[in-house]
Image: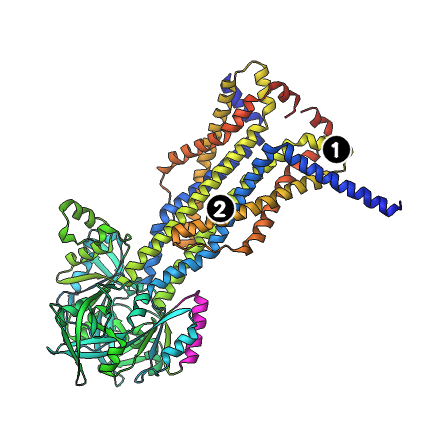
Amino acid sequence: MSATLRARHAERKHTSMFLRMLMRAAILRRGRAASALLAMVVAAAVATAMLNLYVDVQGKLLKEFRNYGANVLVVAKDGSILPGDSLKNVESVLGGRGLAVPFAYVVARTSAGQSVVVSGTDFERVRKLDSWWSVSGWPRKTGDALVGARAAAVVSPQGKMLDLSFQGRTIHLAPARNLSTGAAEDSRVYISLADFEDWARVPPSTIEIAVSGSSEEVEATIAKLREALPAADVRPVRQIMEGEARVLGKTRAMLLASASLIILTAALCVLSTLMGWVFDRRRDFAIMKALGASERLISSFFAAEAGTLGAIGAVVGFVIGIGVAAWIGRVNFHAPVVPRLNVLPWILVGSIAVALISAALPMSLLRRVQPAVILRGE
Amino acid sequence: MFLRLVYESFRRQKRRKALAGVAITLGVGVATAMIAVATDVGDKISRELRSYGANLLVTPQEDTLELQIGGVDLKPPSDGAYLNEADLPKIRGTFWHHNIVGFAPMLPVNVDAQGSSLTLLGTYFSKKLTFGREDFVTGVRSTHPWWKVQGTWPDDDSQDVLLGESLAAKLGLKPGDQIRVNGRVHGVSGILSSGGAEDNQIVAPLALAQQILGKPGAVRRLYVSALTKPEDALARRDPKTMNQELFDRWYCSPYVQSIAYQLQEAIPHSHAEQIRQVAQNEGTVLSRIKGLMLLVTLAALLASALAVSAAMATAIFERRGEVGLMKALGAGDTSVAALFFVEAMLLALIGGALGFAGGALLARQIGQSIFDSKITIDPVLLPVILALAVMVTFAGSALAIRRAVKFDPVYALRGEG
């Protein structure tokens, strides 16, 4: 046998012995190893759930915030009208990442000579955009109108049929439905865009858009809209955008603070369990040392044990944590939190690091003690 | 003898006791801070949600229809009814006045400025008002926090005005310039950016708008920003159909509906309505964030309970030798267990008290750095937290104590285990 072959053989034997010691240590001391692993798993699960929530909460809350309605407004510049293809242009810029609703307005006269603002719009879309509109029912057929609560008292006191005239043309409406919003909409009469264009022959002058996404994405969309619609005035609804940014920022900061506290506590839990575990095995340590094992070998043995424990704990904990995050998402936001695989490396590295630190602290204490003292049980 | 054992155990094993104590202190601290944050978060987020602006609108009862398209008022200025400005401070006398963050009256008038017809909006910026013996400040700066002014806000008693951003660009005016409105010259103190209709308007102190209109004390609309409780089934009921007891409960809850009702009572001939866009969504967002924090707090409590248990188990496990010695000297299982439990309780009380103080400080820090306002914890919670700490410590030690007591003293003394 050549010298290199013998050396390799010895090394393999060495490695298999090392692995056997690792395995036996875990199997023979099941209880202690299990409790250490449990602490690891719980810590990793909690950390995973918190990180996942932290990453996902922005998307979840942004969806809630879209219920506030439009965050971007496209209006015709002074004295002009929106070009006919504006809505199509807006939609091609949005590419499905938002909702655009056209509104047309005129001031019409009732048969009693009252002036009232009449608006034509797409009811299907308004319903999705302005979910806070409280209506007694959405108009379905042509000739149906949605009459604001204040307007109703003036233009059709007993829910009677309603005649509106604009530039000599008259439209006959059935004001079956009432609308209440508490704002300017209450003083208006809404009809479908098709009816409106037939009657008033005025194209939409405003497009209200709810752009989904973070504030940077919304800003980017506004820039693109400005480019696509040079004839119109595109402006963000500051009230909505700033309120959203504020609440979102605070919530995320609060969640981050809580997550760091929780992860810190979980790490502490791992630290104390693992320290006890290693400290408990000071006799193994002493025997190995007495049998002539080098300090490096013993250190690497304990480090390998702790590292394995950390890795297993991290993976199991990750799976459980994903489950917890998904559950929290379902309970609180009625939509599951999407598992973030990119959290895994962080959890893995963090767990192994905490495990190694927990093993290193008692090791440095033990190293200073003579093996004889430990073996005598002092 | 028992007391001496406990005393000596603390005196001689300072390092171990300190370790367990630190774990308890940290665990209780985190739990306290999280409970404090979770109980206060509703109030804090509620205030943040006020940055969406007013959630109530008060209008004259006999008002004619608004003719407004894109913020441009098409109604003849003489038309319609008005609220009386003198009634406004009475809002401070309503039941829920502490929940009213601010209010701002609005009076749009049509004016002729620099040769074109424009809308001038009269309002309070941050007006000092007095109700009873109480002084307070209110205006658009609290109800419309997204209004940004380049230059300075005009004084409410001055003749200076703000120009909307688009209007200023069109007229080519800058802060410090002058503008001629209905033949009189006014200073432009700043340029307003609101993202709404005001960008094309002149915004002036309310008194100036009343003077132009020739109707002192007139207010067209009043925006009120109030902290409210999320709507539930009771909130949506019609107060006219309630019996006395139910009505009292409804009246004394800060629902947006009951605050609207009280505003109508305070201001004669008025009609108050919730602005549904703001009021309705506020409740949903608030309940989502509160729910999230509640679940996170549960996770924090779980993690800290585990940390305390783990630390206690480790601390007791290390002392098998001691248990063996005590048992060899004739101590019974009960007295050994009692010793451990008393020690655990002392640790829990000391660690719990320190943790409570630390947690309160932490909550304060979190409140200060995130919300710019303090989160205080109710001292009433101290006994609850202490009881919790003792319970968790006991639960954490119970298993370890049982095992330590059951351990054969012979093995323990030989150091095998």
Magenta stretch: give its range: A211-229
Which type of secondary structure does the marked residue at label 2 adopt?
helix
Residue occupying image coordinates x 29% and y 80%: B179
**Disc 1 sits on a residue from what chain?**
A
Q: Is B141 placed above or below B43 here?
A: below
Based on the picture, tell me whether residue A226 belongs to the magenta stretch.
Answer: yes
Q: Is A356 on the left or on the right of B45, as rendered?
A: right
Q: Is A9 placed above or below A188 here?
A: above
Report the residue marked by disc 2. A261
Q: Is B198 placed above or below A45 here?
A: below
Which type of secondary structure does the marked residue at label 1 adopt?
helix
Residue occupying image coordinates x 51% and y 16%: B1
Q: Amino acid at mark 1?
A: Lys
Report the residue marked by disc 1. A289
Asked whether disc 1 touches disc 2, contact meaning CB atoms under 8 Å apart, the reply is no
**Mark found first going from the N terminus, 1 or 2:** 2
Q: Are marks 1 and 2 on the same chain?
A: yes
Front in this rendered view, residue B11 or A129? A129
1 vs 2, front mark? 1
Q: Is B273 on the left or on the right of A292, as rendered?
A: left
